[in-house]
Image (cartoon, grey):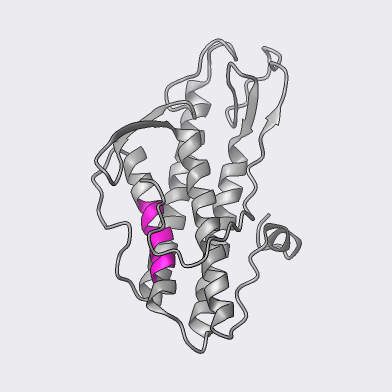
Amino acid sequence: MECKCPRTETAVCYLSVCHRIVLVRPVARGCHSALHRVSSKGVFVDMKNFLRMFAYDYWANRECLAAMRAARAISPDTVGRMAHILSAQKLWLERILKQRQSMPVWPGSTIEDCMALADEMSSAWRSYLIQFTSQLTTQFTTQLGTHLPPGSLDDQVEYRNSKGQAWSSRVEDVLTHVLFHSAYHRGQIALQIRASGTEPAYTDFIHAVRQGFVE
């Protein structure tokens, strides 16, 4: 699913999510950490960072929902954007797990519905990522750098987008997309809430870290 944002009134890019990617030389053969992945291109990714980023994403979505609840007036379109963030998260996880799509990408939801779905998706993504790293621990027994084990970030996710077109994307790219997609729409929501006369949620990543909301 691509985010075409058909109801966008103002284009805002609110990219407060960080994805730590460090270019490194090939790691020594003796370093077999299951939480790390080194591709043939020398890109180093720490899986713990994905757990951290999804924890931040959940916190930011909850802060955004709290601001929406406190707003003097909130439009259905604003609520719809948050519902879209969460339904897209659900759809992408279903694609990774090879499950059928269970809800529309622009569902009609209330703030309470969104809060419940935010909790559900936070738990689901955390469970997936923890299970992913556990699989790497047991599978990563070959020489580092020769080939990636089953269940790696380079695995391909086969799916059809909203136009019915067949696509294949790497797991790592899907995870990164989910995080940036959420941040993009939270920026739009913040703008809409401010336009209604209410202060939007303060969801800067560095603020979350400074205050201890994200470890």
x, y percent for residue 82: 44, 66
The quarter of the picture where residue 43 lies is: top right
The residue at the point 45 percent across, 34 percent down is: 171
Give 165 or 208, whichever is nearer the viewer.
165
Q: Residue furthest bottom?
A: 72
Percent position of residue 155, x then y? 42, 26
Q: Nearer the viewer, residue 85 or 29?
A: 85
Q: Quadrant of residue 16?
A: bottom right
Q: Which residues are magenta?
A: 80-90
Q: Is residue 142 above or below residue 155?
A: above
Q: Where's residue 97, x and y in %?
A: 33, 39
Residue 6: percent from the left, percent from the top?
A: 38, 59
Q: Magenta region, mostly helix, strand or loop?
A: helix
Q: Would you say residue 89 sits in the magenta stretch? A: yes
Identify whether 190 is placed above or below 185: below
Q: Is residue 50 above or below residue 40?
A: below
